[in-house]
Amino acid sequence: MAAVEAEHQNRADETDEISFKDGDSDICQQLMDRYAKSSASQHRHLVATAAAMRSILTSESLPPSPPAYFAAAISSLDSSTEDPMAVSALLTFLSIVVPLVPDGGISAAMAREAVGVLVKPIDGEGEKKLGVASLRAGVKCIGTLLVGFCDLDDWESIRIGFGSLLKFSIDKRPKVRRCAQECLEKLFGSLLSSTVIKEASDTLYALLKEHKSVLSELSSKKIVEGSKVESALKSENAEAAHVLNVLSATVPFLSAEVSSCVFSELCKLMGSQFSPLTRQILKAIDTIFKSSEDTVVVPEIEGVITSLTGYVSLHEKNPADTVLHVALLFFITRTWISYLL
């Protein structure tokens, strides 16, 4: 049974990766041509869902275009939240359709409403009923709608979707987590409004503060060179560790104030001996230096020098690659001080 489920999961992932034609090509027909003979249950449900969506368009005399399919699928999803099988097929269908919608094909108001519809089945109790591929499809849809169609100058328009991406960016399921982190990075990179950037940055910083105690505990946990870092991370504290990965991906886009606060927190987490978080902390600090320009002030740099010096002084007890990384950062910080002074 496990082997069958794994095979179905792989096929579902393949569906997500295969590209489909946009333009005048009917997406329903493309799906039928591709999966009509497939024995995989998720493909049969996907084809049936596509056929149902086309039937809706036909009954309303609408063209089989991506925007029309999107509207029909979102409406159906809004009324199918109690049926996991239907939800899974609709999420997969939407993850295929949404990227095919041309610019301006979905209004900002409709995109905001659609994000709210998408969040419901993949959040809370609904999340437990869906597989990895379905959750990933939902996350992908939310990210695409936020970046491509929502009003990025209005925090309320993206707040719910942003929160969902942030939640799944530290998810225990790698494929869901990576997808959410990629979407979050694209979203941050698309923000231009200082007000929205501040709100998004503050929300992310709140996540860091929420996991601060666990991060502090992990950073003080020593690991002997040669031991596996993964073995030191339990399922209940893995989320906290993933927060650092989110920071590494998004810190170039954070507000100057939050970036400075994050830098300060990272310095506190950087101990003198190798821990389960050392590599992630170093990566995040490295990213801050590469993107901060003149936003890092001298007291903060002096703080990280203290942390790095302590780590280098115990070089014999720490992995060689991290010692080299620290040495490079140490050189960069000294250069920064010379520049700022």
Image: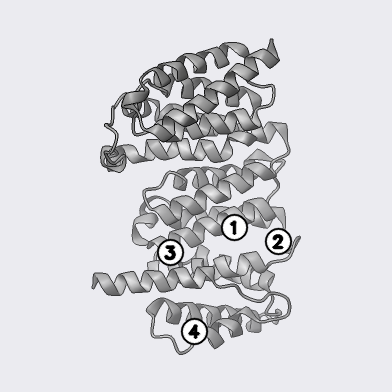
Say which residue appears at 39% left-offset and 85% top-offset.
39
Identity of the residue furthest to the left in this view: 1
Front label number (4 vs 2): 4
Residue 131, horizontal then vertical, whole percent: 37, 63
Is the residue 205 above or below the residue 272 in the image?
below
Q: Secondary structure at mark 3?
A: helix
Looking at the rendering, which quadrant does residue 145 occupy?
bottom right
Q: CA distance from mark 2 to mark 1?
A: 10 Å
Q: Can see residue 46?
A: yes
Q: Secondary structure at mark 2?
A: loop
Q: CA distance from mark 4 to mark 3?
A: 17 Å
Which label's residue is closer to the chain start, 2 or 1? Answer: 2
The numbered disc on residue 133 is: 3
**Amino acid at circle 1:** Ala
Which label's residue is closer to the chain start, 4 or 2? Answer: 4
Verify CB contact (< 8 Å) between mark 2 and mark 1: yes
Say which residue appears at 39% left-offset and 66% top-offset.
84
Say which residue appears at 41% left-offset and 16% top-offset.
310
Q: Secondary structure at mark 1?
A: helix
**Amino acid at circle 2:** Ile
* Residue in the foreground of this view, choosing between 215 and 74: 215
Is the residue 254 above or below the residue 19 in the image?
above
Which label's residue is closer to the chain start, 4 or 3? Answer: 4
Residue that numbered label 2 is attached to: 106
Verify CB contact (< 8 Å) between mark 4 and mark 1: no
Residue that numbered label 4 is attached to: 35
Q: Residues within 10 Å of mark 1 (few under 14, many from 20)?
A: many
Q: CA distance from mark 4 to mark 2?
A: 28 Å
Q: CA distance from mark 3 to mark 2?
A: 25 Å
